[in-house]
Amino acid sequence: MSTRIERRFEALSKQGRAALVTFLTAGDPDLNTALDILMGLPDAGADIIEIGVPFSDPMADGPSIQASSLRAIRKGMTLSKTLDAVQAFRKHDDDTPIVLMGYYNPIYSRGTKQFLSDAKEAGVDGLIVVDLPPEEEGELCIPAIEAGLNFIYLIAPTTDDVRLPRVIQNASGFIYFVSIAGITGTKSANKTDVASHVRRIKSHSNLPVAVGFGIRTPKQAAEIAQFADGVVVGSALVDIISENLNSNGDPVSGTTEKVFQLVSELSGAVKGVHSLS
């Protein structure tokens, strides 16, 4: 049986366009505001939603997402509450795919078997666990796939043709190409270089390829949508939240609407491009 992720990419492929994948950190800037944003993302134009699970040492993330993770932790956000948020979302939306992105420690602490059961029950569709390489796929990747969840691997520009087949051997759902060498939100992607890497990845796999890291504007999203199956935007959305907090760290009026406005603009840009992928 196909997953929501697989069905969404198949449907968008028939439309001839890329998916807009939006990222937010669970519980940022607080539980209620984060839930409001989560609930409104599909109507704003998000095709797939990535939810970052707050972690105290997010090594792959840049300053913006690191700060969002710390804000969420200070407000009491946990893995359990993240799953609760997904479950609440599923009461209103049974179609939009949700991917949890994070680190292995909270999952390991919960117990892999218990986590996978809880995630599946909550309505999670896929996992990105940035600190579990393919050599450790027995820890989570294989059990996740057996539980009916997609396991999505990150491919870096430095992943050569020798390493690439091993990384994607058991990948499912889609492949996430990291468009820059480094952490999130710090540099912009080079369209020509990214297009070359996407073609290279597609020569090794039939899975959709989504591109993230360094995409902040509708113009950049449209450029990437010309050749990728998905465009991932995270830091630009997280920055809207951080820029609209008062001195107590609480969101000012209109914060969620500003997030939705950028998502809508990104969606319009992506939908306006006929994918060449």
Image (cartoon, rainbow, N blue to C red):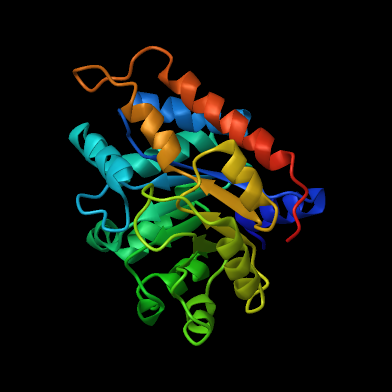
Q: Is residue 133 above or below residue 181?
A: below
**Toward the viewer: 243 or 131?**
243
Residue 222 x, y percent position in the rendering: 65, 44
Q: Is residue 232 above or below residue 30?
A: below
Residue 38 x, y percent position in the rendering: 47, 33
Q: Is residue 203 above or below residue 108?
A: below
Q: Residue at x 35, y 60 (%)?
A: 182
Residue 4 visible from this viewpoint = no
Residue 105 x, y percent position in the rendering: 24, 61
Residue 90 lies left or right of residue 13; in this view the side is left
Quadrant location, the C terminus: bottom right
Residue 114 lies left or right of residue 220; in this view the side is left
Q: Residue at x 26, y 36 (%)?
A: 72
In terms of image quadrants, where is residue 253? top left
Q: Residue at x 36, y 28 (%)?
A: 241
Quadrant location, the N terminus: bottom right
**Toward the viewer: 13 or 159?**
159
- Total label count? 0
Q: Residue at x 61, y 68 (%)?
A: 196
Residue 35 visible from this viewpoint = yes
Q: Is residue 195 above or below residue 96?
A: below
Residue 92 lies left or right of residue 163; in this view the side is right
Residue 177 lies left or right of residue 81; in this view the side is right
Extreme-bottom residue of the structure: 162
Residue 198 x, y percent position in the rendering: 61, 67
In terms of image quadrants, where is residue 221? top right
**Toward the viewer: 59 or 120?**
59
